[in-house]
Image (cartoon, grey):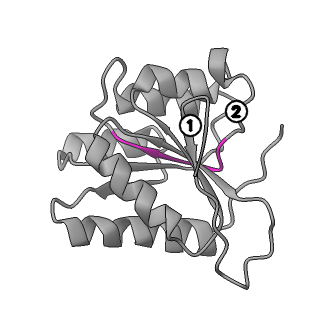
Amino acid sequence: MDKKKGVIIYNRLTMSSYKSTKPINILLVEDNPADIRLTQEVFKEGRIRNTLNVVMDGEEAMIYLRKLGKYAEAETPDLVLLDLNLPKKDGRSVLADIKADSTLKFIPVIILTTSAAEQDILNTYAHHANCYIMKPVDLAQFINVVRSIEEFWLTIVKLPKKEE
């Protein structure tokens, strides 16, 4: 684990069929320290190399994504895991900003939230979220959800190439 500019980086390669030497870059936008820790652990022990960057509020997420200030050298993420209920700027606004920005709109955004509200589900899909996942309360189920995200989004799905 390296720490650079407040970003936690995990790299691991255990899947022999994964050919790229470049890790998948994931931005986790989450304010719950326990959920952050669990997500980090699951991705750390994961099957493919990944860089998991964490920001804890919506404003910081947009600063990161727009490469401002301390994030000027940040790599554009291949995937965003976005909570809806965030301080400073909620995930709904972050999603709308990402999908309205011509340089960010092709980044897949996975909503990972505790909200079961039908309006949240409808609104996030209306703003072009790529999927909506409710966080389970049960620890084992939460771990399974994060592993499923890794399995599907990082090993099966073809992510768009980034222009940097």
Residue 4, picture quadrant: top right
Neighbour tally class for label 2: few under 14, some 14-19, many 20 plus, Cα within 10 Å:
some
Q: Amino acid at mark 2?
A: Ala
Q: Residue drawn 61% across and 75% down?
A: 156
Where does the magenta region start and end? Answer: 77-83
Q: Nearer the viewer, residue 73 or 83?
A: 73
Q: Which numbered disc covers residue 74? A: 2
Q: Give the tally of numbered discs.
A: 2
Q: Residue drawn 54% across and 24% down?
A: 62
Residue 75 can be seen, yes or no: yes
Residue at disc 1, secondary structure: strand
On the rendered image, what quadrant is the C terminus found in?
Answer: top right
Residue 112 can be seen, yes or no: no
Labelled pair 1, 2 in contact (Cβ < 8 Å): yes
Please give the residue where the numbered disc 1 appears in the rendered image. Answer: 7
User: Is 26 covered by the magenta stretch?
Assistant: no
Residue 89, picture quadrant: top left
Residue 64 place in picture, x, y as percent: 59, 27
Q: Nearer the viewer, residue 21 or 59?
A: 21
Q: Residue drawn 32% across and 35% down?
A: 31
